[in-house]
Every structure is written in C-alpha cells, then in structure tokens.
Image (spheres, helix red, strand yellow):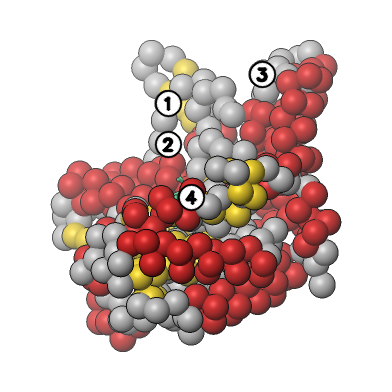
C-alpha cells in the first residue's frame, strides 16, 4: 500500500490554494508535477557540476559527463533495454517520433505503407504524413470502435509486405485505452515491418520492458514521469539505429569532418548533435530513481483504484457521457455533460481550484469519430486521492446546474 499523504509531502506545488480553494491537480496526462528531489537536483547540478559534456578534460566536465551517462543507464534499466547506447536523449516524445519518421522518409519508397491508428496523438500522425509527402509512401490507419479500442481484425487486413513501419501509442492520452501492443508488434514482425511505440502515457503508469515487447522503437517524455520538461528519450534497437540516417548535423555527432566527407559518431552520439539539455538529462535519472522508490506496480494498482472510484462517482452525474470505455485502460476519464461545452465546465471547475484539461487533447481524429469538438479530461496520478475525486464530482454538479 502507498502512503499517499506522505507521498503528497514530496510535491510542494500541491499544497497551495488556487482561486482560494485547495488545488486539485487532475491534468497529469498533460504533465505531471515534480517532487522536491527532482526540483532540488536541477539547482544541485548548476550549483556544483555545470559544464559541457563529452568534451572537457577538466574534472567538472568529466563529472557532468558521468552524471549524464549514468542517467542514460537509469533509463536503460527502467525500460530494460539491452544496451545503454540504444537510449537516445531527445527533447521528448515528439522529437523522438520526428527523428524516426525523418529517418524513414529517406528509407521509404513510393507505395510503401506506414500504419498508425485512430487513437494517435497528433505527434504520432503529422511526422508520418511528412514522411509520406517526402517519400511517396502511403499512410494507413487502424480504426477503432465506440469504446475506443482498436479493431485488430482491421489491422490484420491492413498489414502486408508493403508495410514498412507500424507506429502506435501504448496508451491513448485522451481515452486512456491500453492498446494490445504485444499483439501489434508480433503481427507486424510477420510481414517484416518495424514497430514504433509512442509510450508518452505509459512510462509513468506501468512497467515497460522493451526486450519483452520486442519493439524496434519506444518513445517517452520525462515531464510526464515526474521529471523536467524539455527532455525525453528514444529507445531504438541497435540494428535499427545503425540503419537509420542521422537526424541533425553538428558537434558531438561526428567521428571526423573534412569538407569532402563526414563520418558519424557511434551510437548514441550519432543522434545527439550539439550541446544537449544536460541538466534535465541528468535530472531525468533522478525522476526515475523517484519512480522506482515508489514502485511502478504499486503506482499502477493505486491508480487503477482511482480509475474505478472516479468512474463510479462521475457516473452519478446527470447527463454525463464517457468517451473511452475500453476494458483495458489507465487512470484517464474523458467525458462531456449534456450539451454543455467542455471549456465552460473547465472554467467553472478551475474557479473551484480543480485543474482538468478540456478540448481535443491533440487527438482531433478521435473527436471527429465521436462527432464532438472536445471532452473534459481528468487524468490521475498516484498523488491524487479519492477525496479529490469527490471534490471534482461536487464541482461538476455545480457547473452542470449553472450551465444547463
Ligand atoms: N504522445 C502521446 C500519447 C501524448 O500523450 C503526448 C503528449 C505526446 C505524444 C507528445 O508528448 P511531448 O512530451 O513531446 O509533448 N500529450 C499531452 C496531453 O495529453 N496533453 O498535453 C500533452
């Protein structure tokens, strides 16, 4: 069992009033709050070892380099990658996907096919459309049902030897659906396609093992994992990262340069041009230490409890309609109340101290599927409580009365 009150002490931001009410933070799918240990580690880096990495002979530079590389190893172990050089630091999930899609745009040929799904965040749609534009490849989309589950039979029909890469999310950010990625990966292997998993919503909530999954790429962002913004990772199998063309050119990513020819550095540096986000890269490792100290299994179990409790309580609100009722889902509840615009409800509950997200959540195709402009989304983290859910229900009742 987690001691939630003790855990909440780790997050200073939670202990404040917003609009004269105690803050209830239910926008964790957008970004999570940061524990003191993470906030302090950023100052600690700048106060003690700030310097550029992989370059200096001096002690500070070596210390910063060691800390940065140690963080890479922490990510490696967190997702059980085989090698630390299979972990590339990026600005986050969006950049990770762009890196792979840009590489594929050079490898793909006309009429090759890329498969994504209806449930994707725009950041796992647009880069593939760009890759199609550049290469002449064709984008195919796995459809979904009313519950927000992917239609796996349709996926079978889309797969062929033309399929070169399948890119799907592990968990939908707007509906919370946990996708059957093991099955997707296995099926894609049969036709020889590579698989990229957008794990932005998964790494904070459940155990990820990239070797067990046997995916070719896996992407995530530190800021959703109780770490800093502006840093994330791309995991890629060694053989794929060797095959993929470099993303950006510059310092750090070269072995040698003449005006005639440049030889690229070995992995992971081939994909890390320029001075990286050193402080946040190091502190990403601190966030992983923190997650490990709580235990991802315990987090998953507690958040599931919050999901069940929240779904049951919210269901009592007159006129509520849930979007995303998959059997397998994480602690995200998307809904509307009657015909009230989500933004209006979001504004009223904000006045009552409650942060939820409203809108299309960067998943416009899902909204088009349901023929709505957006939803209200409450997304829970392990520092949330059932009492906070009660406050949300109360606030929504008020909003409903005011707006209908
Ligand atoms: N993929 C998924 C599934 C996401 O949920 C997000 C961010 C991204 C990719 C992009 O991640 P980034 O860190 O590079 O921005 N999702 C959300 C959200 O649901 N609300 O705000 C950001």
> In the rendered image, which quarter is residue 162 located in?
bottom left
Residue corresponding to mark 2: 246
Q: Circle 3 sits in a helix, a strand or a loop, which is it?
A: loop
| Viewer-nearest of discs 2 and 3 | 3
The nearer-to-camera label among 1 and 3 is: 3
Mark closest to the chain's N terminus, 4 or 1: 1
Does 387 sit left or right of 219 as displayed? Answer: right
Q: Residue at x 64, y 28 (%)?
A: 278
Q: Which x, y percent locates residue 222?
A: 60, 46
Decide which of 95, 389 is in the foreground and name it.
389
Q: Position of residue 363 (x, y in %)?
A: 32, 58
Q: CA distance from mark 1 to mark 2?
A: 7 Å
The residue under label 1 is 249
> Is 122 placed left or right of 327 in the picture?
left
Q: Which residue is mark 4?
A: 350
Q: What residue is disc 3 on?
A: 52
The reply to whether discs 1 and 3 touch (Cβ–Cβ < 8 Å) is no
Q: Which sits in the foreground, 127 or 203?
A: 203
The quadrant of the rendering that contains the N terminus is bottom right
Mark 4–mark 1 distance (CA, rounded to whole Å): 44 Å
Question: Between marks 1 and 3, how big is the CA–CA gap?
Answer: 18 Å
Up the image or down, 70 lies above or below 190; here it is above
Q: Residue at x 78, y 47 (%)?
A: 10
- Viewport quadrant of the C terminus: bottom left
- Provide residue 353's location: percent of width, then percent of height: 56, 50
Query: What is the distance, in whole Å, between disc 2 and disc 3 at their CAs?
Result: 22 Å
Q: Secondary structure at mark 4?
A: helix
Whether the residues at callouts 2 and 3 have beta carbons within 8 Å, the answer is no
Disc 2: CA contacts within 10 A as few (<14), some (14-19) or many (>=20): many
As displayed, is residue 309 above or below residue 368?
Answer: below
| Label 2 vs 3, first from the N-terminus | 3
Mark 4 in CB contact with mark 2 (< 8 angstroms): no
């Amino acid at each position: 069992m987690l001691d939630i009150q003790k855990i909440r002490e780790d997050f200073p931001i939670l202990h404040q009033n917003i609009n004269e009410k105690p803050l209830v933070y239910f926008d964790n799918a957008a970004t999570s709050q940061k524990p003191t240990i993470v906030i302090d580690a950023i100052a600690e880096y700048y106060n003690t070892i700030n310097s550029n990495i992989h370059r200096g002979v001096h002690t500070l530079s070596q210390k910063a380099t060691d800390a940065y590389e140690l963080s890479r190893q922490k990510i490696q172990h967190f997702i059980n990658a085989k090698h630390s050089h299979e972990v590339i630091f990026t600005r986050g999930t969006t950049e990770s996907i762009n890196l792979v899609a840009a590489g594929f745009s050079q490898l793909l040929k006309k009429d090759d096919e890329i498969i994504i799904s209806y449930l994707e965040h725009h950041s796992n749609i647009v880069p593939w459309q760009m890759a199609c534009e550049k290469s002449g490849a064709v984008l195919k989309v796995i459809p979904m049902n009313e519950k927000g589950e992917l239609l796996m039979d349709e996926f079978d029909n889309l797969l062929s030897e033309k399929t070169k890469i399948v890119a799907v999310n592990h968990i939908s950010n707007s509906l919370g659906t946990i996708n059957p990625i093991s099955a997707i990966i296995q099926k894609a292997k049969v036709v020889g396609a590579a698989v990229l998993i957008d794990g932005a919503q998964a790494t904070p909530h459940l155990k990820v093992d990239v070797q067990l999954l046997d995916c070719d790429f896996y992407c995530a962002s530190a800021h959703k994992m109780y770490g800093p913004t502006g840093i994330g990772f791309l995991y890629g199998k060694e053989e794929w990262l060797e095959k993929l063309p470099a993303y950006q050119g510059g310092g750090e990513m070269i072995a040698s340069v003449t005006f005639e020819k440049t030889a690229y550095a070995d992995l992971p540096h081939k994909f890390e041009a320029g001075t990286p986000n050193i402080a946040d890269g190091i502190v990403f490792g601190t966030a992983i230490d923190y997650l490990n100290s709580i235990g991802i299994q315990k987090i998953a179990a507690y958040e599931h409890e919050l999901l069940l409790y929240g779904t049951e309580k919210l269901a009592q609100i007159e006129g509520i309609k849930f979007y995303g009722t998959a059997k397998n889902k994480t602690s995200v509840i998307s809904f509307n109340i009657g015909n009230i615009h989500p933004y209006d409800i979001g504004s009223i509950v904000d006045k009552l101290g409650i942060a939820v997200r409203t809108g299309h959540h960067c998943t416009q195709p899902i909204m088009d599927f349901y023929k709505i402009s957006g939803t209200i989304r409450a997304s829970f983290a392990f520092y949330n409580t059932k009492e906070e859910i009660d406050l949300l229900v109360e606030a929504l009742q008020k909003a409903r009365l005011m707006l209908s």
